[in-house]
Image (tube, rainbow, N blue to C red):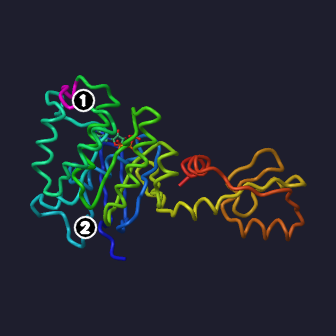
């Protein structure tokens, strides 16, 4: 399938922080989660996708066309939720709704009203007087109601209470089903990633570790409980150990082949939780 969004050899330097080179493609009908420790470059990458942060090198292509040297009409296809909305404080929800709906021809008023009701957002209160969680809910309602092809969300569940987070997960799944859509979401919440993502894009200190299919990643990592102590040197696929008889690997086939060849028996092998896999990946040397 033709990707809707492509990034080629994208690079940016901010002081001593270097992002890239990054090559990625995003196909319709998929949800990509951007994963990385604080300061890994997730927000910077998202801002570059929106042309809000200037790239030093590389190309971004939307529907096969470069977004550079064009007017900003391509933004009609993408709605973006930044970590914090700037410049909204002196407006209330109704005014922000008018401003946003004016810009997007795909604006869906009925859907916005529905989201406002679901999240119980007071539209007549000034944005600055809303709690952080309600500010987030309003920004999400404004972003989703644009009903664009592509949605870019930077930590959408931050500051939200637990029931609202759960509701948002369902809303985002339903949003994907409205028509053919693409979603890119940066999140530190494993719940968000587990429930939503098809692919994980892992950034480490500005470097791209890779794009991984979530299910494939989950099946790759295994923990073995052995009957005998392991040798001191690492075994094939090993990424971690607990004591001498519990080992975590990321290459099931190679590990099992080694264990069988060297006559190590295992009592059981189990899959890892996504949170544990992400922690291992983010702590591994590049
Ligand atoms: N406007 C800026 N001025 C100076 N440095 C910046 C600026 N924006 C980003 N950086 C630096 O770029 C790096 C990446 O920041 P970025 O916000 O993209 O990370 P992140 O992965 O989104 O982090 P977090 O998970 O904490 O939100 C950091 O070292 C940050 O200090």
Q: Residues within 10 Å of mark 1 (few under 14, many from 20)?
A: some
Numbered badge on residue 61: 2
* Secondary element at tag 1: loop
- Image quadrant where residue 126 sits: top left
Q: Main secondary structure of the magenta part?
A: loop
**Between 148 and 224, the one nearer to me in the picture:** 148
- Mark 1 or mark 2: which is in front? 1
Task: Tell me if residue 181 can be seen.
Answer: yes
**Is 242 positioned to the left or the right of 229 in the image?**
left
**Is 234 positioned to the left or the right of 27 in the image?**
right
**Is 130 positioned to the left or the right of 284 in the image?**
left
- Residue at the (37%, 47%) spot, across then down: 41
117 magenta-colored: no
Q: Write down the region rendered in magenta.
A: 122-128
Mark 1 in CB contact with mark 2 (< 8 angstroms):
no
Image location (x, y in percent) of residue 249? 70, 58
Task: Tell me if residue 7 can be seen.
Answer: no
* Secondary element at tag 2: strand
Image location (x, y in percent) of residue 146? 21, 52
Outermost residue toward the top? 129
Image location (x, y in percent) of residue 11? 31, 57
**Between 3 and 58, the one nearer to me in the picture:** 3
Numbered badge on residue 122: 1
| Disc 1 from disc 2: Cα separation | 38 Å
**Between 265 and 138, the one nearer to me in the picture:** 138
Looking at marks 1 and 2 on the same chain, the residue that comes earlier in the sequence is marked by: 2
Image location (x, y in percent) of residue 173? 41, 54
């Amino acid at each position: 399938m033709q990707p809707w969004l492509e990034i080629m050899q994208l690079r940016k330097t901010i002081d001593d922080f270097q992002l890239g080179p990054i090559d990625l493609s995003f196909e319709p009908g998929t949800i990509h989660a951007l994963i990385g420790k604080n300061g890994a470059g997730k927000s910077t990458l998202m801002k570059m996708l929106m042309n809000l942060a200037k790239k030093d090198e590389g190309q971004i292509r939307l529907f096969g066309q470069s977004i550079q040297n064009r007017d900003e009409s391509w933004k009609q296809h993408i709605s973006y939720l930044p970590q914090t909305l700037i410049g909204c404080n002196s407006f209330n929800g109704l005014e922000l709704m008018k401003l946003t709906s004016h810009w997007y021809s795909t604006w869906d008023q009925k859907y916005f009203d529905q989201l406002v009701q679901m999240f119980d957002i007071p539209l007549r209160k000034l944005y600055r007087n809303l709690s952080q969680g309600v500010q987030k809910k309003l920004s999400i309602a404004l972003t989703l109601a644009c009903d664009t092809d592509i949605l870019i969300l930077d930590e959408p569940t931050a500051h939200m209470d637990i029931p609202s987070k759960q509701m948002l997960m369902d809303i985002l799944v339903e949003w994907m089903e409205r028509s053919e859509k693409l979603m890119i979401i940066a999140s530190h919440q494993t719940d968000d990633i587990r429930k939503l993502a098809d692919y994980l894009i892992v950034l480490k200190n500005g470097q791209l570790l890779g794009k991984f299919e979530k299910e494939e990643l989950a099946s790759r990592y295994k923990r073995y409980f052995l009957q005998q102590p392991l040798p001191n040197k690492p075994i094939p696929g090993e990424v971690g150990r607990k004591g001498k008889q519990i080992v975590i690997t990321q290459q099931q086939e190679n590990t099992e082949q080694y264990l069988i060849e060297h006559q190590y028996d295992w009592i059981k092998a189990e899959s890892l939780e996504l949170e544990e896999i992400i922690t291992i990946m983010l702590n591994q040397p590049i």
